[in-house]
Image (tube, rainbow, N blue to C red):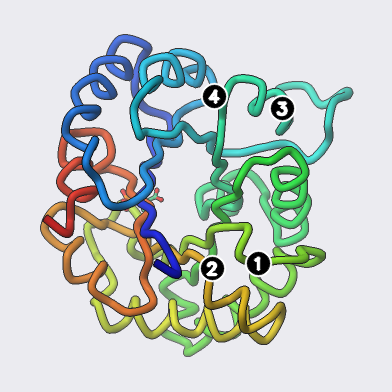
């Protein structure tokens, strides 16, 4: 298989120690025969318990952000090595909520992505256009800029995961159509080939994210360039297992 599908959950700022442990315990038997890689990106404080609960299963645990420095005077921040120490294998970088509410820029996305790679954590780098950017025909320009600036200095783009998340589809219940998602994901792959190398781009895992759920996952996953999903709301319930088992 050139690209193993990859379904990841983004719990955002949800769940408690008890509800996290309960959901992971319930998901374990439901996803154990998955044909894709499976990950849950949980709030930082829940990482130790989530790693413990997922032990011995095929569920990997990810973070939702990473600081670019190894250590130092950065109050409130968490470094890649600290996360790695706890068994974190993936980290979402540059989610649109971080771009929108926390001043994330392509430059900081780039620094975080490089820090993750340096520590052996696979970054899930989010790109995507807003509704007005789509309506103004700027989707490809915006995504080209996010890729060119956000991924600067990466030697092999197949070492990262890209999540295409149209901002207008996140948490809104409005999914991109299968064709819209495929078209933009194919553009991302073509651009990655141009900016890096065509061979790496062939191996690059690109997820779709934005109101993906148990009902629409099959159609999205059937698209030739879509290799997985980044799932927000639906990853907080057992529906996540249905998405992971989209091919059954
Ligand atoms: C997300 O937060 O990455 C996301 C895609 O959210 P939702 O599935 O809820 O739209």
Left or right of residue 180: residue 155: right
Q: Which of pointers 1 and 2 lies earlier in the amino acid sequence?
A: 1
Disc 4 CB within 8 Å of nearest ligand 1 atom: no
Q: CA distance from mark 3 to mark 2?
A: 29 Å
Left or right of residue 171: residue 156: right
Residue at 44% across, 13% down? 49
Instruction: Between residue 169 and residue 27, name the one nearer to us.
Output: 27
Residue farthest to the front, as pictured:
1
Residue at 54% across, 46% down? 92
Q: Which of pointers 4 and 2 lies earlier in the amino acid sequence?
A: 4
Q: In the rendering, which numbered label is found on residue 24?
A: none
Circles 4, 3 touching at the beta carbon (< 8 Å): no
Q: Which of pointers 3 and 2 lies earlier in the amino acid sequence?
A: 3
Q: In the rendered image, which residue does mark 1 sit on?
A: 157
Q: In the rendered image, which residue does mark 3 sit on?
A: 77
Instruction: Between residue 32 and residue 118, name the one nearer to us.
Output: 32
Disc 3 CB within 8 Å of nearest ligand 1 atom: no
Q: CA distance from mark 4 to mark 3?
A: 10 Å
- Give the SS element for disc 2: loop
Circles 1, 2 touching at the beta carbon (< 8 Å): yes
> Looking at the picture, how far across and down is residue 78, in whole percent?
70, 27
Disc 2 crowd, CA 10 A, few/some/many (<14, 14-19, 20+): many
Q: Which of pointers 1 and 4 lies earlier in the amino acid sequence?
A: 4
Nearer the camera: disc 4 or disc 2? 2
Q: In the rendering, which numbered label is found on residue 204?
A: 2
């Amino acid at each position: 298989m050139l690209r193993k599908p990859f379904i990841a959950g983004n719990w955002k700022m949800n769940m408690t120690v008890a509800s996290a442990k309960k959901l992971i315990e319930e998901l374990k038997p439901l996803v154990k025969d998955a044909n894709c890689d499976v990950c849950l990106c949980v709030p930082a404080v829940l990482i130790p318990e989530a790693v413990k609960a997922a032990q011995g299963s095929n569920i990997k645990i990810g973070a939702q952000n990473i600081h670019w420095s190894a250590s130092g005077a950065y109050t409130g921040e968490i470094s890649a090595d600290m996360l790695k120490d706890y068994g974190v294998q993936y980290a979402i970088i540059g989610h649109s909520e971080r771009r929108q509410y926390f001043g994330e820029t392509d430059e900081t996305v780039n620094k975080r992505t490089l820090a993750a790679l340096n520590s052996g954590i696979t970054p899930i780098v989010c790109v995507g256009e807003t509704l007005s950017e789509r309506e103004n025909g700027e989707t490809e320009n915006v995504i080209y800029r996010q890729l060119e600036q956000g991924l600067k200095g990466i030697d092999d783009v197949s070492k990262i995961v890209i999540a295409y998340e149209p901002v207008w589809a996140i948490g809104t219940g409005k999914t991109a159509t299968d064709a819209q998602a495929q078209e933009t994901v194919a553009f991302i792959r073509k651009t990655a080939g141009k900016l890096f190398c065509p061979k790496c781009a062939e191996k690059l895992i690109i997820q779709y994210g934005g109101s993906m759920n148990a009902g629409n996952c099959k159609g999205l996953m059937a698209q030739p360039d879509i290799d997985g999903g980044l799932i927000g709301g639906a990853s907080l319930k057992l529906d996540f297992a249905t998405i992971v088992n989209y091919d059954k």
